[in-house]
Amino acid sequence: MRGGDCGKCMRGNESAGVPGTCRAADGSLCSCGTHRPHMEPVVTHSIPRMRRLSALALAALLLVACGGGEPDVSDAAPLPPGTQALAAGARLPAPRVDERCYAPPVRTVFHSELEWNAYWTGVNQTCTAPPLPEGVDFGREMLVFASVGKRMSPRDSIAIDASGVRNDSLIVVVRRWMLKNGCPGPRQATFPQSLVKLPATPYPVRFSEAHITIPCETES
């Protein structure tokens, strides 16, 4: 996708600590870049059809939760070259959200508590920013956040799974699971999110994303 497919790319006010975001109106990813001007565009790809069986196995492990659970990724597609699975303890609890206050589709990075608070109040000025996760040291670490906004299937999910430096950029690997359109079943509002902490780095950040379609369940 190019910039013309992007929907709306919002610039932030760096001097005020307000990060911009890159999002598309239909919930898909933009190719405009993340909230800092030097960051590279998002890179997306889809899982080939031959891997759908693995996706189906993973779908059975999805957690049904208001915030959108993260699946077990042990059987997911191979990681991109130069990236490694997240270190133990990198995953953090996703912010608590509800129908009134939740993050729209976005992939972004936070380098300070000021940026964290400014993002959440910028999303909805009537909402209070969720508390910063405990144990984050912005002198040594940064937060990486991914959200797909509001979904109506509890089987939809998103996970930040890996990272690694490649060609003078930090590649952050995101995997998104989506129930195939038109599947029967209960409709329930969910807000899939993923939040991790990574070592702070001077490298520009790029997101490498795989979209995995979950087939409809068949009746036995």
Image (spheres, helix red, strand yellow):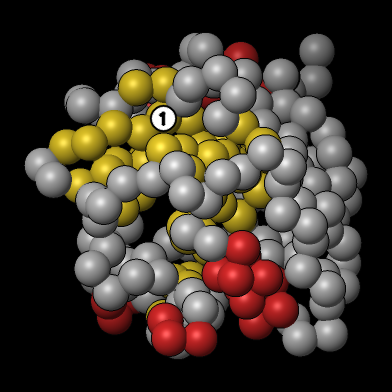
**Residue at screen point 51% across, 78% down:** 17
Total numbered circles: 1
Type of amino acid under label 1 = Ala
The answer to whether residue 44 is visible is no
Q: Residue furthest front?
A: 139
Q: Is residue 165 left or right of residue 187?
A: left
Quarter containing the C terminus: top right
Quarter containing the N terminus: bottom left
Quarter of the figure with residue 83: top left
Judge by depth and name the residue closer to the eye, 139 or 102: 139
How far across and how far down the image is residue 35, in percent?
40, 70
Q: Is residue 71 above or below residue 192?
A: above
Quarter of the figure with residue 42: bottom left
How far across and how far down the image is residue 24, in percent?
48, 72
The answer to whether residue 154 is visible is yes
Residue where numbered disc 1 is placed: 162
How far across and how far down the image is residue 160, in percent?
51, 37
How far across and how far down the image is residue 132, in percent?
72, 54
What element does badge 1 sit on? strand
**Residue at screen point 83% across, 77% down:** 127
Q: Is residue 173 left or right of residue 62?
A: left
